[in-house]
Image (cartoon, rainbow, N blue to C red):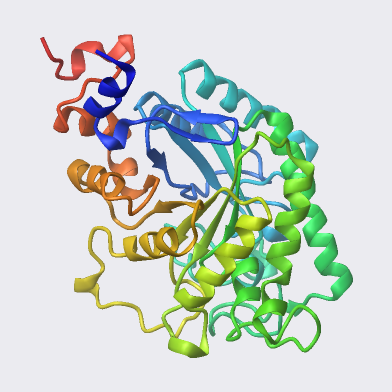
Amino acid sequence: MSTQQQELSIPPLFQPFTVRGLTLKNRIVVSPMCQYSATDGFANFWHVQHIGSRIVGGAGLFIVEATGVSDVGRISPGCLGIYKDEHVDMLSKIVQFAHEQGGHIGLQLNHAGRKASTGRLWEANSRKALTNEQGGWDVVGPSPIAFDEHHRIPAELTIVEIQEVIQQFVDAAKRAIKAGFDLIEIHGAHGYLISSFLSQTSNKRSDEYGGCFENRIRFLVELVERIRANIPSEMPLFVRISADEYVGDEGWTMKDTTELAKILQKCGVDLLDCSSGGNNANAKLLSPTSIVQGYQVPFSEGVKKSVDGLATGAVGKIKDAQFANDLIKDQKADLVLIGRQELNDPYWPIRAAHELEYQVAVPPQYLFAFPRKH
């Protein structure tokens, strides 16, 4: 059988994907999901088991949760950080294990901005700002506009401070390289700092970082350019975006996303990870009955159709193997990011392969736990 025939016999979801100098063994990505289990930003044994189990579960890529580029850039006191050189050691051990198991691993860099200083997900104050007595801190943003009545009013960043934050992202990227990560994703979604700069509902500045579209995207564009210039040319760079703010033309829309995508591609971004929402507490989100498997796929598909050559990732309650496979087959996305289903089942990729009648490698320690072809 020729190489081409072999490739055609592989389900699209399990075909390799090459971006710059990295080749993933399949199109399944474990989406970055906060674990709220760090202390002072340091990874620990919880992160070892969480990441390790999903790497051996067969995902082509694992992207580590939103990791703060500064202590005040963390979402909660329990979030990972990479704002100290000392953070690198444990992260590098996790990366080493991922590589030993034949997997690839990326790191999502984030500054939570006005949505920082909240409790852990499972705590009563998970959607509320912590007081200083509870371990909280002052937050920053493009303008002094709180996300909602439960969050702090951010201090407006000065132009000098904006440049300092950009440098924090660059320094974090350099630490990620030192730790051995295969790629970097910049978190520009869900109402965190970058996202809040993009939207005119949260950015009311009158200087070069606010106002018109070109000014509101300036922070992200400069940040991308600086990071791209400070990482190896063969290292992929992803950006996660909220493609629609769900408040109509007064906020960020899919049209804005498409225009931004064209600019980011020229700046060296390789893939747009297409999510949505999170920046506006008054968002007119889809009804609960509409938030179904693949409800955000049109964003990924729309970018692919509008921006030639820019890869995209699809997210959004994706859990069925055939559905995920069809997304790749129908060219609606290049990668499929699996979140909650991976929390539910770290070995989803192996089971997905079985459902698609395709055999993948199983860790020998677990060989007898999974159905095999004879």
- Residue lying at the far left in this picture: please name it: 374
Camera-side residue of 64 and 153: 64
Residue drawn where x is 64% and y is 71% of the image: 131
* Quadrant hosting residue 155: bottom right
Residue 35, position as x, y percentages in the image: 48, 47
Residue 366, position as x, y percentages in the image: 28, 14
Residue 165, position as x, y percentages in the image: 78, 61
Residue drawn where x is 84% and y is 76% of the image: 158
Question: Residue 167 vs residue 251: left or right?
Answer: right
Residue drawn where x is 51% and y is 16% of the image: 100
Q: Is residue 19 visible?
A: yes
- Residue lying at the far right in this picture: please name it: 160
Residue drawn where x is 65% and y is 80% of the image: 213
Q: Is residue 76 visible?
A: no
Q: Is residue 13 above or below residue 283?
A: above
Question: Residue 99 vs residue 294: left or right?
Answer: right
Q: Quadrant of the C terminus?
A: top left
Residue 146, position as x, y percentages in the image: 61, 82
Camera-side residue of 39 and 288: 288
Q: Is residue 290 above or below residue 35?
A: below
